[in-house]
Amino acid sequence: MIKVHHLNESRSQRILWMLEELGEPYDLVHYTRNAETRLAPPELKNAHPLGKSPVLEDETTKIAESGAIIEYLCSMYGGGRFGRAPGDVDWPAYIEWLHYAEGSAMLPLMLHLYVSRLGEAGAPLHPRIESEIKNQFEYISGALGERSFLVGDSLTGADVQISIQLEMARAFGKLAAYPNLVAYLERLHARPAWKAAMGKGGPHPMGQ
């Protein structure tokens, strides 16, 4: 049985969504953030030395990092769905989007989150952060265009992976400038598997 070490209000929510899309049964180990610090509890270090979530266990396999987990799940359980294999025409784009989400798109959003907590002390950094958020989301918007999904004509792990970045951008008031991304996120959130994952993962304010 697959086991997911799941932290509330975190990026591990998309792993639950991926599993729901795959139709694979899984057990959840819930962890709750410290209400004051917003940090993960120390018990998560028992699952992985970094004390971060998500962490997935599958028999003797233990794997962290969202992109790696999604790639693993699609490869092992997708049966040709939700992923792309080497040699497929869409494989390079799939791999790029799968890793772009955390590799490039997430950094300015995290900087915005943390620097905003500095108040006036962080003011000099905001123009550069805002510029980079604009750069990233113009890129995503232009690449998606009027298509329904990032890669091909059906949902892939790349769409699941980038959902958190879209949710964060919306929470920060940065998504409204890109109507196609707003519609894209609404389509993703309308999927039954996404709703099922929300029901199991607990409150996820960014997902509303």
Image (cartoon, rainbow, N blue to C red):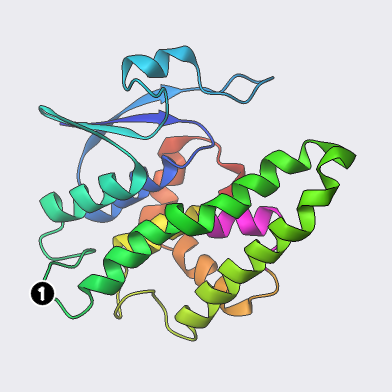
Residue 79 in picture, x, y percent from top left: 10, 60
Binning the other alpha carbons within 10 Å of mark 1 as few (below 14), some (14 to 19) or many (20 upward) gives: few
Position of residue 139 relative to residue 101, above or below, is: below
Residue 208 appears in view: no
Q: Residue furthest bottom?
A: 146
131 over 142 or under it: above or below: above
Please name the predominant secondary structure of the magenta segment in the image: helix
| Residue at image point 19% right, 55% down | 74
Image label count: 1
Q: Residue at x 69, y 39 (%)?
A: 114
**Nearer to us in this view, 66 or 167:** 66
Q: Which residue is mark 1?
A: 87
Question: For this view, does 198 lie left or right of residue 95?
Answer: right
- Picture coordinates of residue 104 (x, y %)? 48, 58
Up-down: is 118 above or below 17?
above
Which residue occupies the foreground of this view, 34 or 126? 126
Question: Hey, which quadrant is residue 181 in on the image?
Answer: bottom right
Q: Left of 121 or right of it: where is 156?
A: left
Residue in view at x 18 percent, y 81 percent: 89
Quarter of the image where the N terminus is located: top left
Name the spot of residue 183 as percent of width and height, x first: 56, 74
Residue 170 lies in magenta, yes or no?
Answer: yes
Q: The disc labelled 1 sits on which kind of residue?
A: Gly
> What segment is highlighted magenta in the picture?
165-175
Q: Is residue 71 magenta?
A: no
Q: Observer-nearest residue: 183 or 108?
A: 108
Please tell me whether mark 1 sits on a helix, a strand or a loop. loop
Residue 30, located in which quarter of the rendered image? top left
Horizontal and vertical percent position of residue 182: 59, 71
Q: Residue at x 27, y 44 (%)?
A: 69
- Look at the image and tell me whether residue 196 can be seen: yes
